Amino acid sequence: MTEPKAAKDIPIYTISAAAKILDISVHTLRMYEREGLIVPFKKESNQRLYSQEDIDRINCIRNEIKEKKISINGIKTIYSMIPCWDIVKCTKKEREKCGSFNGSNSPCWTYNHNLNVCGTKNCRDCIVYSQYSECNNVKELIKSISK
Amino acid sequence: MTEPKAAKDIPIYTISAAAKILDISVHTLRMYEREGLIVPFKKESNQRLYSQEDIDRINCIRNEIKEKKISINGIKTIYSMIPCWDIVKCTKKEREKCGSFNGSNSPCWTYNHNLNVCGTKNCRDCIVYSQYSECNNVKELIKSISK
DNA sequence: AATAGTTGATATTTATAAATATCAACTATA
DNA sequence: TATAGTTGATATTTATAAATATCAACTATT
């Protein structure tokens, strides 16, 4: 009796509820978002909402910062090394024009990618964000594509 | 008339000379070494010596810390994602026992690897250290092994 | 053989990233 | 429609990583 995968990704927590659960301030949550570490839901009114998956993700990020002593810019750089172009199957032409493919400071979901295969798709729903940038998964991904 | 590649890797600077060139303290150089960011030459007496390549490498590390705001542990984590097992052609058995293959906090050259293909070879002379961990090269490496 | 520079280890200082606070305008909810 | 919570922007505080200083023992160099 496993729950459907999406069940953990239902937007239920307001920013203050999420902050309380995580024992951090709402300001910190907004900072993480501004830095491109998280992409919460947004209502039409622009209000943020968080799912249990978001909470788990943020707990992981906290651990990287507090326990592993990796700075926010370090985490961004690590995320930027995920070979998204391979995962989402960008063409050579698309890669050449892509800020994510050509940069190394920020995760792909912080760039505009309306002009490539990603289109206007919400990055929350992309496995690059939801799966491969999960806690400690980047090295496992590199292992899987290496010989 | 290009110089032989090794010319830049001749140990000529003492720690105080290197510190003066880099405009940092000798203590900082020793700290970077303790953290596993650099591997200087060692004389039989244990005295450190630095080459021009070392100076260039340390300048790059300084830039990552000071300009890109990546913490030392962040840099270590990034180095740890270099697929050394692929580069030096470790066997499956060797990988299973390797701290570098299985960890994600520290570069491969900070682990003991006497029992795998690296043997007692000095990591300075390994391309994983000398080439692939050069400034900004990690993402380029990931690009080259991805589809 | 004397001076300058080195070693590792521990303690201290400083620079700054991360977190928090404040603000006025806006939105949700009871 | 009143209260509580939200928004983004800017300013301030705090926690701590990075850098430096100190130490006694040892090594290189003149």
Image (cartoon, coloured by chain):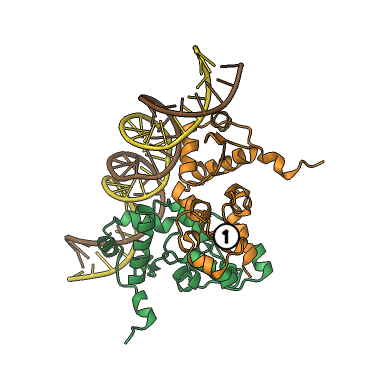
Chain colours: A orange, B green, C brown, D yellow
Disc 1: CA contacts within 10 A as few (<14), some (14-19) or many (>=20): many
Q: Is residue B136 visible?
A: yes
Residue reaching furthest bottom?
B1
Does dot 1 land on a helix, a strand or a loop?
helix
Residue B45 falls in which quadrant of the image? bottom left
The residue closer to the viewer here, D24 or A82, is A82
Q: Chain of mark 1?
A: A
Residue B15 falls in which quadrant of the image? bottom left
Q: Position of residue A113 (x, y in %)?
A: 52, 56
Q: Residue at x 60, y 38 (%)?
A: A55
Q: Position of residue A118 (x, y in %)?
A: 58, 57
Note whether A20 is above or below D16 in the view shown.
Answer: above
Q: Quadrant of the C terminus of chain A?
A: bottom right
Q: Residue at x 46, y 74 (%)?
A: B125
The residue closer to the viewer here, C1 or B39, is B39
Q: In the image, is B31 to the left or to the right of A65?
A: left
Q: Quadrant of the N terminus of chain A?
A: top right
Three-letter code, disc 1: Cys
Residue reaching furthest right?
A1
Q: In the image, is A125 to the left or to the right of D3?
A: right
Q: Is residue B114 visible?
A: no
The residue closer to the viewer here, B20 or A112, is A112
Residue C20 falls in which quadrant of the image? top left
Q: Position of residue B80 (x, y in %)?
A: 53, 59
State the residue position of label 1: A84
The residue closer to the viewer here, C15 or B13, is C15
Q: Residue at x 47, y 55 (%)?
A: A77
Note whether B1 is above or below B77 in the view shown.
Answer: below
Q: Position of residue B4 (x, y in %)?
A: 36, 83
Task: Count all numbered tags in the image, as a single digit.
Answer: 1
